[in-house]
Amino acid sequence: MNPSTHPSEKSRTPGAATLSVACSNCNLRELCMPAGLSPADLERIDELVATRRRLKRGEALFRSGEAFTSLYAIRTGFFKTCVTAEDGRDQVTGFQMAGEIIGLDGIVGDRHTCDAVALEDAEVCVMPFDKVGELSREVNALQHHVHRIMSREIVREHGVMLLLGSMRAEERLAAFLLNLVQRLHARGFSRSELVLRMTREEIGSYLGLKLETVSRTFSRFAEEGTIEVHHRHLRILDAEALHRLVNHPGCN
Amino acid sequence: MNPSTHPSEKSRTPGAATLSVACSNCNLRELCMPAGLSPADLERIDELVATRRRLKRGEALFRSGEAFTSLYAIRTGFFKTCVTAEDGRDQVTGFQMAGEIIGLDGIVGDRHTCDAVALEDAEVCVMPFDKVGELSREVNALQHHVHRIMSREIVREHGVMLLLGSMRAEERLAAFLLNLVQRLHARGFSRSELVLRMTREEIGSYLGLKLETVSRTFSRFAEEGTIEVHHRHLRILDAEALHRLVNHPGCN
DNA sequence: CGTTACATTGAGTCGCGTCAAAAAAGGTGG
DNA sequence: CCACCTTTTTTGACGCGACTCAATGTAACG
């Protein structure tokens, strides 16, 4: 299986009608929508997605400072989000893949506070936030779902803080890889093979490391027989070893 | 003014009736509730707070793994939240003060994923999450407010990720101090004087540093005339210098 | 007043950042 | 399809900032 192609994209013709697939029969529904909806509610949910939007690799879905209007569900493709400090340095805050929701940062201040950039050609469902609010007043399950999505993001970020605050380079990278394959596997991909859609520098930014350190650490893992790396293609040979690294009573 | 006493607590008798003060006439309302509510909505909002709960210093409001039922609005006191990894190391994910909301982490999985511990005697308003959901279906402003609070937390954590991922020790500590006084000042305290309610170790955990580094960096700031530290009492002498540090095109 | 928790400071070490160079990959235009 | 250029990746040598270990000093508390 080729990790570059999302399962949902397999049988779709690029450029085909963009609204032909409603949430109610989208195969990503279980990932981005609440479970166990009644048929009636399902129909209502279909109203959520106003339009779809396609992006090319490198294109921004939104940028820091832009007005916030909508949340976005990723249909295909891979994104990074990053914040930029006043002095120009920036920090990748996450990598997002199909079924995940981006744009939550914009709710507080009615403008986005980070950039979302496609790391490969992508398509997103545009969900106007007004409509999300409206519908979640009527569809209970949706309300709870929105809360859960935001809470999940908060918890995820707690994990990143733990990683950044108390792990050494090897542990960070091990945790990163395990998280990535785990999410890919949940989408039907291999649990040992993956294609890195981001550069070493982006990985480094996310993990609070320099690209050289990321590269060196990959090399060390490879020497030890834990992984196999060829550029952006990566195979996990010894997941156990990675797990041991992450759970090793470490440095803090 | 003594930063240890919250303004709202000034004229209250400890142990007095715990439900005497409703949201509608709580002087923290502007901090933790939506602005511009109609009198009718205000009355409904009063239903939100089921009970209050007092905690002694060191006591936990909730712990990781406990069932999630409620959000908590801090009335008085000061909290830390921290996550614990499987191997036992832990990470302070935030410090919370009057008017702030804790417990959002519990929504996703119906159990808390971090500990919330009072760093001084404290009182919180207990808001059953069911009721929050119910009411926000009816009171539009509340719905939006809940979204804003969660989004704000996400954005705050982005900032922490930036700090942990790309700042040096001095910058981290400077950013930390500026953030703390800014929030205290918004609550009517001095913008230059503060009492640290947490230990050096807790500051270090939050900032991804060892306590010794925190201590040394405080000392260096003091030598340079930027601050004055006496144990937990801290005075900012040169806020400009701290700002310069934070915005210095730095290390990443 | 003794005990315990917390803070400060010093000396030494090490992990990761910095700087630099070369190799490999990927995209572009002829 | 090949040559060329840019971007990305790898690897080495070296230095520094933060960690570790350790001892002493100071405040908080029963």
Image (cartoon, coloured by chain):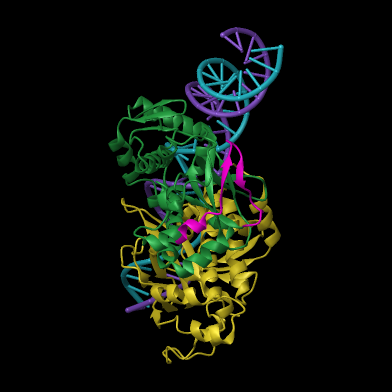
Chain colours: A green, B yellow, C cyan, D purple
Above or below B188: residue A226: above
Q: Is residue A57 magenta?
A: yes
Above or below C15: residue B8: below
Q: Which residues are magenta?
A: A44-68
Left or right: residue D30 versus residue A132 is left
Give the residue furthest to the left.
Answer: A240
Please tell me which residue lies in front, B189 or A215: A215
Q: Quadrant of residue A3?
A: top left
Left or right: residue B52 versus residue B140 is left
The spot of residue A204 in percent (x, y) is 51, 38
The spot of residue A84 in percent (x, y) is 62, 48
Please tell me which residue lies in front, D16 or B179: B179
Please tell me which residue lies in front, D29 or A71: A71
| Residue B139 can be seen in this image | yes
Which residue appears at 59% of the width and 80% of the height?
B37
Above or below A170: residue B179: below
Q: Is residue B170 magenta?
A: no
Q: Quadrant of residue B66?
A: bottom left
